[in-house]
Image (cartoon, rainbow, N blue to C red):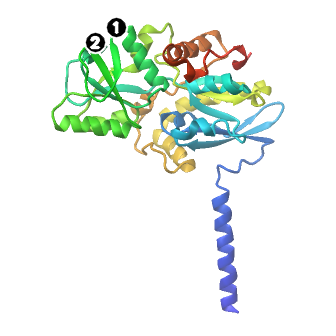
Amino acid sequence: MKKFFVAIMLVAVLVCAVAFTACSPEDIIPNVDKTYTLVAPDGAPALAVANLITQIPTEKAVYGIKRKVVSSSIISAEAIKSDVDLAIVPANLGAKIFNTSSGYKILAVVTNGNLYITSSISCQVNSLQDLKGKIVYSIGQSSVPDMIFKTLLTNAGVEYAVGEEPAVGKVTIKYYADGSEVISQLALAKSENKLAFGIYGEPAVTNSFAKGFEQVFDLQKLWAEIDDSSHDGYAQAVLIARDSVCEDSEFVTKLIKAFTLNESNILEAPTKAVGNIKAIYPQSALQSNITMDVISRCNIKTVATNTLEGRTYYENTLKAVMAINANLIGGKLPSDGFYLG
């Protein structure tokens, strides 16, 4: 009898364990009429949803927000899955999704650039002209930041090429998959007392200062100098939604306000913000010891695009992309249908 009771208890424990695994707190949002799934890529853009509220009531219904974080390498496929209602995607991808399949609207820019150029050893650099004849290791080939950097070089009258070795009179760009690979190349150059430059994002930039690297340029500030905007950066990642989500205009308005509130929340409690991300995506690259200063350099700010100013800010980034490779945004600027009325 005792063995039978123990066996029953073990089965009960296993059933409970399976139920708990399948239904984490993020999967169950009580007391809502409808739940929307919001997907975001890991890294700095994920901070835009770190402390986002999970319930938004309107006159029509009470909506639940289920946050989902995925690897940045698969966000393009995840964003258009049938069970995804809202997504944070690279600025160019938002435009491309609309231009190729419609059915979506842009709500806001939520990440305004978090890339910096560092040097392997101490050097005197005053302008982008000083990068001529040097090699720049970079992440994000054919991404928005890549197009921004190339636009900045062109605007400064600096030619660029993609290659393995430095070229006289040009900036040579060599691409790597992520920031860790760029940092490895800079470390190798430093060990040989060679000057090299790298482009990668926060929070990896601040963490790499411990290796003796130095920041030489802030890409956001360089862009702000040539962009007629009040924002200190460019549109790096945006929030898009299916048309059906936008049918309740009160919900959309409150959602954008929730993103704005999240900005101050993650600054006030950085480690809590990272903890919230790791709760839904344990393998997140965000480090638990992140600081307020690093979060501020991630440039998580909400710029609604249903105003002329917000739309212009976003489109200026798209124009930079389109001038180099129009296919990255679907061949043209999105029409009025992409924007909220």
Q: Where's residue 39, x and y in %?
A: 62, 39
Q: CA distance from mark 1 to mark 2?
A: 8 Å
Tell me where residue 341 sits by quadrant: top right
Res. 51 visible in picture: no
Point out residue 21 in the picture as x, y percentages from the top left corner.
63, 60
Please indicate, yes or no, whether residue 99 appears anywhere in the rendered image. yes
Residue 298, above or below 153? below
Against 67, is 206 above or below? above
Tell me which amino acid carries mark 2.
Gln
Question: What residue sits 70% from the left and 51% below the top?
Answer: 28
Residue extending furthest bottom?
1
Q: Quadrant of residue 285?
A: top left
For image coordinates 50% across by 46% down, the residue present is 275
**Which numbered disc covers residue 3?**
none
Q: Is residue 40 left or right of residue 54?
A: left
The disc labelled 1 sits on which kind of residue?
A: Gly
Asked whether disc 1 touches disc 2, contact meaning CB atoms under 8 Å apart, the reply is: yes
Mark 1, Cα crowd under 10 Å, few <14 / some 14-19 / many 20+, is few
Residue in front for this viewpoint, 107 or 31: 107
**Residue 196 in picture, x, y percent from top left:** 24, 28
Which mark is first along the chain, 2 or 1? 2
Report the residue marked by disc 1: 157
Viewer-nearest residue: 71 or 209: 71
Give the x, y percent position of residue 314: 57, 16
Residue annotated with mark 2: 129
For label 1, the SS is: loop
